[in-house]
């Protein structure tokens, strides 16, 4: 959870109020992956699935992972 918050914090510091310009984030895992906050969300879902060990939780994890991977692919463009 802290990794997700940290990367959202980095994203929040990119723009000042009223700024509409697109900026490329730096720091954290942004140097290695496109959307590290999505990566941490997937890891959180995976952790919940491993704890609960139900088909429903694994289905939600798989669906969320696919959705977030598609979103990061679009972000890359």
Image: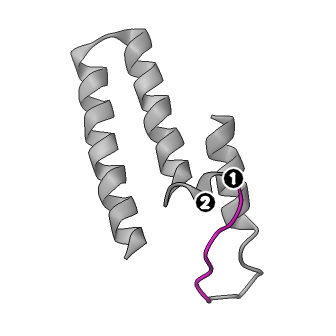
Residue position for label 2: 31
The x, y position of residue 6, in whole percent, is 71, 48
Seen at 58% across and 84% down, the residue is 22
Q: Is residue 41 left or right of residue 66?
A: right
- Image-quadrant location for residue 10: bottom right
Is residue 34 one of those drawn in magenta? no
Residue range of the region highlighted in magenta in the rendering: 21-27
Q: Image quarter for residue 58?
A: top left
* Coordinates of residue 43 in the picture (x, y in percent): 47, 32
**34 horizontally vs 21: left or right:** left
Residue at horizontal 27%, vertical 46%? 66
Q: Looking at the image, do the residues carrying marks 2 and 1 touch, with CB atoms under 8 Å apart?
A: yes
Q: Which residue is mark 1?
A: 28
The quadrant of the rendering that contains the C terminus is bottom left
Identify the residue at the far front of this view. Answer: 32
How many neighbours does mark 2 have within 10 angstroms: few (below 14), some (14-19), or many (20 or more)? few
| 13 over 5 or under it: above or below | below
Task: Say which quadrant the N terminus sits in.
Answer: top right
């Amino acid at each position: 959870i802290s990794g997700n918050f940290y990367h959202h914090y980095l994203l929040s510091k990119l723009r000042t109020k009223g700024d509409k310009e697109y900026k490329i984030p730096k720091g954290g895992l942004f140097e290695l992956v496109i959307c590290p906050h999505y990566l941490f969300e997937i890891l959180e879902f995976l952790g919940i699935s491993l704890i609960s060990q139900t088909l429903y939780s694994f289905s939600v994890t798989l669906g969320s992972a696919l959705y977030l991977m598609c979103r990061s692919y679009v972000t890359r463009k």
